[in-house]
Amino acid sequence: MKEVIYKWIFFRLMGWKIVGTIAPEVKKCVMMVMPHTSAHDFYLGIFTRGITGLEMNWVGKKELFKFPLNYYFKYMGGEPLDRSGGLNKVDSIAAIFDRKEVFRLAVLPEGTRKKVDTIKTGFYFIALKANVPIIPVTFDFGRKQVSLGKPLMPTGNLEEDLAILSKHFIGVKGKIPKNGFEFK
């Protein structure tokens, strides 16, 4: 029932569409979601998750996952990030991939909704360490579409892999276009 309501709101009322797919066999991946220029990106992600029927996840510091919000955050795909024991963020998140049977992690490389000159590359090193593909995802307000790209297994050559991934983001407009990162 929820999927029907999501589809009606997303497709009919909002006029958006979803282009591409993430194969259900891809049970673990890092979704590189860009551009991130507005809080509107959150509900577009919720609609996409509900319509595709695929579990999609995010991480947050473990302190967020306290009663009673812990139930809601887990329901929404959240996973608490425990960095105790001297683990850095990449190692901590890679450990989550090891524990989970299904974990499709959404990461926003811009790290903020404000204009940035460089993107954060943690998503890349998480995928490399966890040995999972990176899937580029756009929320394109210009075309009113969510685009799910093709998986790319990171090779260890960040520059070459980013050149391939960046092609998915060319011409994409965020809700506030002037704040979106542009690949050159």
Image (spheres, rainbow, N blue to C red):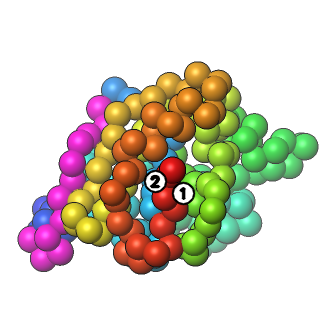
Q: Secondary structure at mark 1?
A: loop
Q: Secondary structure at mark 2?
A: strand
Point 54% across, 38% down: residue: 162
Residue 91 appears in the rendering: yes
Check whether the beta carbons of the residues at disc 1 and disc 2 lie within 8 A of each other.
yes
Name the kind of residue labelled 2 in the image: Val
Marks 1 and 2 sit apart, C-alpha to C-alpha, by: 5 Å
The one of 83 and 151 positioned closer to us in this rendering = 151
Task: Give the labeled residue for mark 1.
Answer: 108
Point 34% across, 34% down: residue: 150
Magenta stretch, residue numbers: 12-23
Name the kind of residue labelled 1 in the image: Leu
Q: Earlier in the sequence, mark 1 or mark 2?
A: 2
Task: Give the labeled residue for mark 2.
Answer: 33
**Can you tell which quarter of the image residue 42 is in?**
bottom left
Point 71% across, 60% down: residue: 62
The one of 84 and 10 positioned closer to us in this rendering = 10
65 up-or-down from 128: above or below: below
Where is residue 153? Give x, y as percent. Answer: 50, 25
Instruction: Report the side of 30 relative to 148 (left or right).
Output: right
Point 75% across, 47% down: residue: 89
Where is residue 46? Give x, y as percent. Answer: 36, 63
Where is residue 55? Give x, y as percent. Answer: 39, 46
* Residue 145, magenta (yes or no): no
Instruction: Report the side of 116 relative to 166 (left or right).
Output: right
